[in-house]
Amino acid sequence: MAKDPRMGAYMIGVVSMRYGVHPQTLRLYEREGLLAPSRTEGKTRLYSDEDLERLEFILNLTRDLGVNLAGVEVVLGLRDRLERMQEDLERLVGAMEAAGLKDVSRPPASATGLVKLPPRGVRKR
């Protein structure tokens, strides 16, 4: 994953002190695929602001909610998948609107249900 060089970059020691996490814990999160800091040519880990946001989410799950690392992996996977689906939906809506469909985000006021229901209080036998 290419990271924007203009974003903040923090070394593992700074991140460790800032969040009260042992550097080995951060290395474990990387080995487990939960974090993916960029590397310098000398192989030094550099954590971006995006990485720090993800770390905060991981720490919230583990510290505050008691979720284990396997659960964290599932939650992060679902969150990433949801974000991709949201982006896909936004692209689809944009394409439909570009094709001339008006306000595809809401059904028209005249839309009716697929199943015709009897009036309230009337029972069918």
Image (cartoon, rainbow, N blue to C red):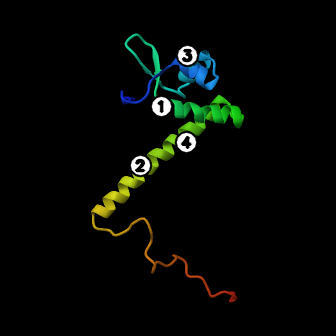
- Give the residue number, with chain letter if any, for mark 2: 87
- Give the residue number, with chain letter if any, for mark 1: 49
Q: CA distance from mark 1 to mark 4?
A: 21 Å
> Crowdedness of circle 1 by 10 Å Cα count: few (<14), some, many (20+)?
few
Asked whether, in this view, residue 2 is left or right of residue 45, the answer is left
Task: Identify which amino acid the numbered label 3 is placed on.
Answer: Gly
Mark closest to the chain's N terminus, 2 or 4: 4
Task: Name the disc covering residue 26, or none.
Answer: none
Task: Indicate the quadrant where residue 67 lies.
Answer: top right
Q: Where's the C terminus, which quadrant?
A: bottom right
Task: Identify which amino acid the numbered label 4 is placed on.
Answer: Leu
Q: CA distance from mark 2 to mark 4?
A: 14 Å
> Crowdedness of circle 2 by 10 Å Cα count: few (<14), some, many (20+)?
few
Task: Name the disc covering residue 78, or none.
Answer: 4
Mark closest to the chain's N terminus, 1 or 4: 1
> Crowdedness of circle 4 by 10 Å Cα count: few (<14), some, many (20+)?
few
Q: Residue at x 62, y 20 (%)?
A: 25
Q: CA distance from mark 3 to mark 2?
A: 35 Å
Label pair 1/3, CB-CB below 8 angstroms: no
User: Which one is nearer the viewer's eye here, 2 or 16?
Assistant: 16
Task: Identify which amino acid the numbered label 2 is placed on.
Answer: Glu
